[in-house]
Amino acid sequence: MSFNLTIIGSGSGAPLPGRFTSAQVLNVHERFVLIDCGEGTQINLRRFGINFNRIELILISHLHGDHYLGLPGLLNTFHLLGRKKELHIAGHRKLKELIDFIFNMAGFAPSYPIHFHIIEDIAIDSQLLFPAFSVIFFPLRHRIIATGFRISELPNKRKMNREFIFKYQPSVDAIKLIQAGNDFLAPNGQVVSQDEIFLKPSPPRSFAYVSDTVYSREIVSYIQGVDLLYHEATYAALLQASAIDKMHSTSVDAAKIALEAEVKKLAIGHFSSRYKDTDLLLREAQALFPQTIACFDGLKIEI
Ligand SMILES: [Zn+2]
């Protein structure tokens, strides 16, 4: 079952040729979640072969332009493509006001239903449930209200062991009893337990998105043990003072959080445009947390 992340934009501030601003697509079993939507996101979605119609949910972390200015255009393009499928958007209250305003100004009604989930109305730690995954929301520490997301696969269904089926060829009635939680009584009188009948399901995979924030240990409990953490690293360690001043993180801050949260892998991004290449930031983070990768537009990460 697919569970992977494609980086659509890995920069901060303004879009540059080759490095657009924040956007990523998480593929959960071929259901797509677009996370942030910087200017020009739809261009890179096409470049990287993302099927627009698969996008079921859009999460917007906060209302700085490099995280959402691509959204009105993308919603308009969905309409031009004749989308009928419903779209969920989770964002802050002012984002809904902004979208309503833009639609009203043009007397525009999209061809598809939009369900808007206002983040301020969702209790911290409560889940938003979708057919293949759940989302929890947690506060970041930034200059304006900003929210992080943790997206997890729903617990996998247990699968019956093929060897059991082959060996005992249980009847339909016997299978119903097994599925109701009973052990199986074989014709020779042997009892086969549920643990022997079913394969152990693989643990649900999870991804956390942290952008933008100053170094904050308060987020650790929300992202503990995720398979992949995306954490912003706007600056290299030398610019720690600027990071604190602008309420952003350095590459070292991101690595410290990854260590404390005992995540399996870290991806850093939201790079300042001053860094033409990101080797320095990657090296700084890897010195503390070796399982770090540096994002670039078009990077696909299997989780
Ligand atoms: Zn920001």
Image (tube, rainbow, N blue to C red):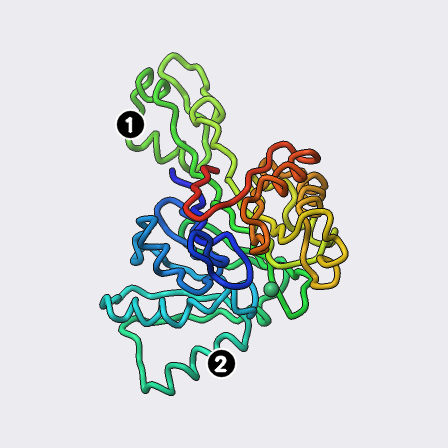
Q: Is residue 116 left or right of residue 222?
A: left
Please say if 90 is above or below 280. below
Horizontal and vertical percent for residue 167?
Answer: 33, 15
Q: Amino acid at mark 1?
A: Ser
Q: CA distance from mark 1 to mark 2?
A: 58 Å
Can you identify the residue that label 1 sits on? 171
Q: Which of the numbered marks, if any, corresponds to residue 97?
A: 2
Q: Residue at x 36, y 61 (%)?
A: 42
Among numbered discs 1 and 2, the one appearing first in the sequence: 2
Q: Is residue 142 left or right of residue 267?
A: right
Quarter of the displayed picture in which ligand 1 can be seen: bottom right
Please say if 80 is above or below 219. below
Residue nearest the viewer, comparing 244 with 226: 244
Horizontal and vertical percent for residue 235?
Answer: 65, 52
Q: Is residue 41 left or right of residue 144?
A: left
Residue 302, located in which quarter of the rendered image? top left
Q: Residue at x 54, y 76 (%)?
A: 93
Quadrant where the N terminus lies? top left
Residue 109, located in which quarter of the rendered image? bottom left
